[in-house]
Amino acid sequence: MTIIANNQDRNICQTCGTRYAGNVPEICTICADDRQYVLPTGQKWISYDEVKTGRSIRFNHLLSNLYDLRITPPFAIGQKAHLICTPGGNLLWDCIPFIDEPTVAFIKSLGGLKGIAISHPHYYSLMAVWADIFDCPIYLHEGDKQWIMDESPKIELWQGQKKVLWDGMEIIHTAGHFPGSTVLHVPGIGINGSLFVGDSLYVAVDRKFISMMYSYPNAIPLPQKAILQISDRVSPLKFDAMYGAFEWQNIENGAREMFTRSVSRYLEIFK
């Protein structure tokens, strides 16, 4: 299986892992934005052959119907994706900038992918390749269409506050971190439902609070209006578990209380 044609093209940003179609810019558009950064050593473009050298994907079986996927050794931002298995079809939540034959074979053994949904542009990464391999749509909020650097006919832009998928799953538009930032509500995972948040909501290292920021690496806060909108759209959801983009960000229970406590703490600052 050929995962990517033209593997030697240097069209992947080393810092954020975004793949570009056609000619690459001098500076990665994603990294030049205030929500990301260009390394002090400058912009570096690398090929897929360079990315794949010595790397694989590790699957972690969290629950009977849930896996997370991580590139090892880590590359770029280092986020994980989640594979959510439901009777109506499997969904990949968020994406990673690498894929290999064992990963394709394993996911196909579970029934393949019915769709891919991505929280925000920092995780668009290799989405077009994943969608081509599994012949499935990519659900992105229209608010972030300007950040699509690798166009694909598989991309389905949606509008509004939520997109209903299957088996009760819904993508919820929160905005905040990006205009089109989203979270995924899955009622069939966990005792009281789960929220998959990428870093639209960022679980703190102490796992007691959630951050909601315009830029995490550059510590740029969100205004009160954005915090209130996130609260208004997340609070009605039934969930007790939360899964974020990084290693420590699995909250098996108590996530709703953590979210409510964090919103209250933010709003105290604005008084």
Image: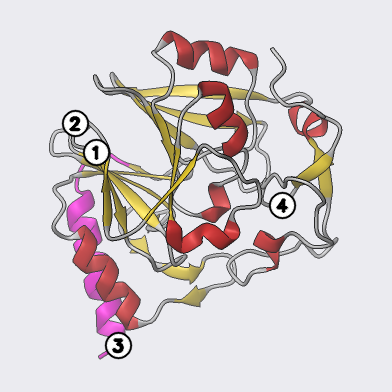
The colour style of the image is: secondary structure
What is the C-alpha distance between the residues marked 2 and 4?
Answer: 35 Å
Q: Disc 1 marks which residue?
A: 169
Q: Which comes sooner in the sequence, label 2 or label 4? A: 4
- Given the image, on which type of amino acid does mark 3 rest? Phe
Disc 4 is placed on an element classified as: loop
Q: Disc 3 marks which residue?
A: 270
- Given the image, on which type of amino acid does mark 2 rest? Gly
**Is 255 contained in the magenta span?**
yes
Q: Mark 2 touching mark 1, by CB under 8 A?
A: yes
Tell me the number on the disc at residue 265: none
Q: Say which residue appears at 59% left-offset and 53% top-offset.
A: 148
Closer-to-camera residue (248/99): 99
- Given the image, on which type of amino acid does mark 4 rest? Thr
Q: Quadrant of residue 62?
A: top left
Q: Is residue 111 above or below residue 265?
A: above
Disc 1 is placed on an element classified as: loop
Q: Disc 4 marks which residue?
A: 15
Q: Say which residue appears at 77% left-offset and 33% top-offset.
A: 48
Q: Is residue 14 visible?
A: yes
Q: Quadrant of the N terminus?
A: top right
Residue farthest along the bottom direction in this orientation = 271
Question: How many neighbours does mark 4 have within 10 angstroms: few (below 14), some (14-19), or many (20 or more)?
Answer: many
Q: Disc 2 marks which residue?
A: 188
Magenta segment, which residues?
A: 251-271
Closer-to-camera residue (61/23): 23
Q: Is residue 52 above or below residue 195?
A: above
Closer-to-camera residue (139/220): 139
Q: Which comes sooner in the sequence, label 2 or label 1? A: 1
Question: How many neighbours does mark 2 have within 10 angstroms: few (below 14), some (14-19), or many (20 or more)?
Answer: some
Foreground: disc 3 or disc 2: 2
